[in-house]
Image (tube, rainbow, N blue to C red):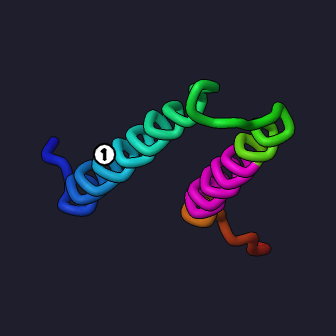
């Protein structure tokens, strides 16, 4: 079965954007060098708390959108 145009567009756009997120996270790793930067565990907890919050928020948007499609309207017969 051929993939739909929407599916192909999703794969292309999502792949590019996920790779950008991965690349930015890897660049954030460069800030971990204590020879160049000063930070505390509170800074680390705050940064990753925010990253995790936005990740959860984004996942919820996807899950909510999928649930919209799967909802069935209730009707009496």
Q: Please provide percent x and percent y for residue 6.
A: 26, 62
* Residue beneath the point at 23% across and 59% down: 9
Q: In the image shown, does 67 or 56 lie closer to the viewer?
A: 56
Question: In this orientation, which residue lies closer to the viewer: 53 or 31?
Answer: 31
- Give the main secondary structure of the magenta stretch: helix
- 13 to 52, vertically: above or below: below
Task: Identify whether 30 is placed above or below 68.
Answer: above
Q: Residue furthest right?
A: 42
- Asked if the magenta segment contains residue 62, the reply would be yes
Above or below residue 76? Residue 10 is: above
Q: Quadrant of residue 40?
A: top right
Q: Total label count? A: 1
Q: Quadrant of the N terminus?
A: top left
User: According to the image, label 1 marks what residue?
Assistant: 15
Q: Secondary structure at mark 1?
A: helix
Q: Position of residue 15 (x, y in %)?
A: 31, 45
- How packed mark 1 is, by other alpha carbons closer than 10 Å (few <14, some 14-19, many 20 or more), is few
């Amino acid at each position: 079965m051929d993939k739909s145009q929407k599916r192909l567009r999703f794969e292309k756009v999502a792949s590019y954007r996920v790779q950008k997120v991965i690349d930015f996270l890897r660049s954030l790793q460069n800030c971990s060098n204590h020879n160049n930067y000063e930070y505390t565990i509170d800074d680390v907890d705050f940064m990753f708390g925010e990253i995790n919050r936005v990740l959860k928020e984004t996942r919820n948007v996807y899950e909510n959108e999928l649930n919209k499609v799967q909802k069935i309207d209730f009707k009496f017969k």
